[in-house]
Image (cartoon, rainbow, N blue to C red):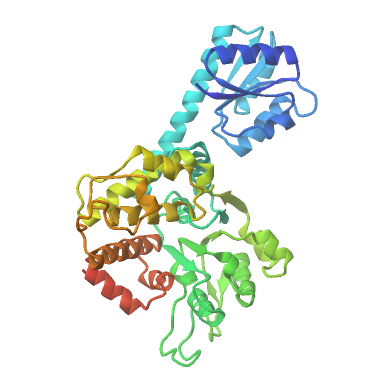
């Protein structure tokens, strides 16, 4: 079964095609013009369109569709004897063409083949992405597939990308994907959290400083921009960047030049920027809290990572994956989430998205004795077992297990950058290293 968009200005043709494809088991969406069709692409895996239509004709629609999704297969309908039009459509990127009057079986087979080719291309790109990232991508909802496909198509095009999305949706995954599939993949991937430091320290960390630039600057420091030379710089929470630094960032984006704090020289840098934020930057521009010129420099291409409530199909596989990982870390046997619990998790809106779901599952597993975990655990996550038996882990052990999971996840989110992880956890780097040793994590174990 495929989701198919039919586009024709003749109601009779639309009705006939809709009946044919519905009998074939396909989900059908219709449009009577090219303009209407562009607003009805949600989840579509194949498009069947007439070539001759008033306003936007079939060829114009084909080109517009190719710009939005170059992989989306488009089958064009041509009048009998219009071979020249069919050839033009194929040269413009059409997947196939059918001549009117069309054969019923031929239509169904053409759509089936087109949709299958579309799915296979998506699966291939997903496998390539997982291989490049070195980890599986959990979830297969249409909403997630669309943003992954868009990221993979953009990865090889050296443009600045603004990744939008609520907290915890996985913007860092998209940013990593944009790097590892780019021509800069052999270069460094550097992350900078724009919200982690006050303005004076943020400027020094981002652009570097010269020796003696300020009290305590006993040696020169290469900023994140310089460290990312030849690679990708991810600006996390770019909406929190102080206005005083935004002008300097704009210059670096426009001219590829930066000036370390206290330095007289100007340095050239070759960096691709991926900016991430959960803020509405357009609203911040209107409120005067974000430079309009910088906004347009960052928003060359915008990707929006969907919240978990818009891809509920991914909640259960994510929860099961988190449970397996936690069980392995905590040394618990036979851990699995019951169908009732999984359904309860699927029904929640998860304002904290994937991060909140992971935290919840980690807590449930850490406080369990192993074996099945039921829906009742959500109502009393900190209560002792109902049997009255002592828990398999003491309170100290449970707290340590939760702390280990939190430190490990935060460090992974920061790409192994200990300074950044310490900032997010609001502890010193020395304290973080001590916790890494204590929990047997990383090279300090």
Is residue 408 toward the left or the right of residue 425 in the image? left
Is residue 402 toward the left or the right of residue 202 in the image? left
Q: Nearer the viewer, residue 268 or 370?
A: 370
Residue at 48 percent of width and 46 percent of height:
348
Residue 60 to residue 358: above or below = above
Asked which quadrant contains residue 53, the reply is top right
Q: Nearer the viewer, residue 249 or 321?
A: 321
Residue 13 to residue 310: above or below = above
Residue at 28 percent of width and 47 percent of height:
324
Asked which quadrant contains residue 9, the reply is top right
Q: Is residue 128 visible?
A: no
Residue 425 to residue 311: above or below = below
Residue 267 to residue 319: above or below = below
Locate residue 374, reporting x and y percent: 33, 44
Quarter of the picture holding the C terminus: bottom left
How many numbered marks, from 0 up? 0
Locate residue 243, reporting x and y percent: 64, 74
Is residue 54 toward the left or the right of residue 188 in the image? right
Locate residue 259, reporting x and y percent: 56, 78
Residue at 38 percent of width and 73 percent of height:
422
Q: Is residue 140 visible?
A: yes
Residue at 66 percent of width and 6 percent of height:
101
Locate residue 134, reporting x and y percent: 33, 49
- Residue that protrudes farthest toward the right in the picture: 54
């Amino acid at each position: 079964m495929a989701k198919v968009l039919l586009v024709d200005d003749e109601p009779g043709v639309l009705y006939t095609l809709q009946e044919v494809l519905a009998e074939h088991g396909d989900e059908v969406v219709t449009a009577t013009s090219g303009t209407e069709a562009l607003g009805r692409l949600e989840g579509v895996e194949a498009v069947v369109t007439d070539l001759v239509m008033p306003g936007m004709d079939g060829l114009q629609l084909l080109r517009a569709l190719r710009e939005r999704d170059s992989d989306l297969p488009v089958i064009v309908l041509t009048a009998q004897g219009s071979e020249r039009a069919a050839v033009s459509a194929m040269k413009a990127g059409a997947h196939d063409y059918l001549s009117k009057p069309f054969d019923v079986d031929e239509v169904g087979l053409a759509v089936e083949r087109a949709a299958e080719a579309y799915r296979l291309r998506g699966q291939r790109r997903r496998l390539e992405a997982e291989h490049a990232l070195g980890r599986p991508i959990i979830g297969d909802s249409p909403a997630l597939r669309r943003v992954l496909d868009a990221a993979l198509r953009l990865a090889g095009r050296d443009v600045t990308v603004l990744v939008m999305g609520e907290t915890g949706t996985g913007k860092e995954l998209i940013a990593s994907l944009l790097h590892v599939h780019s021509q800069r993949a052999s270069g460094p991937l550097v992350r900078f959290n724009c919200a982690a430091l006050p303005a004076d320290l943020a400027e020094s960390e981002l652009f570097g400083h010269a020796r003696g630039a300020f009290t305590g600057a006993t040696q020169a420091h290469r900023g994140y921009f310089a460290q990312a030379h030849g690679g990708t710089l991810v600006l996390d929470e770019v909406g929190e960047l102080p206005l005083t630094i935004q002008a300097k960032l704009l210059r670096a984006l426009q001219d590829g030049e930066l000036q370390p704090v206290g330095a007289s020289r100007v340095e050239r840098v070759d960096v691709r920027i991926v900016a991430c934020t959960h803020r509405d930057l357009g609203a911040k521009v209107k409120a005067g809290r974000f430079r309009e010129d910088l906004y347009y420099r960052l928003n060359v291409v915008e990707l929006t990572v969907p919240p978990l409530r818009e891809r509920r199909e991914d909640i259960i596989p994510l929860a099961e994956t988190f449970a397996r990982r936690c069980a392995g870390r905590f040394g618990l046997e036979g851990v699995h989430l019951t169908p009732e619990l999984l359904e309860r998790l699927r029904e929640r809106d998860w304002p904290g998205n994937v991060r909140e779901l992971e935290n919840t599952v980690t807590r449930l597993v850490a406080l369990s004795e192993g074996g099945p975990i039921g829906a009742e655990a959500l109502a009393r996550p900190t209560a002792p077992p109902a049997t009255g038996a002592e828990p398999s882990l003491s309170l100290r052990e449970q707290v340590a297990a939760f702390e280990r999971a939190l430190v490990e996840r935060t460090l992974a989110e920061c790409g192994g950058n200990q300074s950044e992880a310490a900032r997010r956890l609001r502890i010193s780097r020395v304290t973080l290293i001590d916790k890494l040793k204590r929990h047997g994590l990383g090279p300090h174990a």
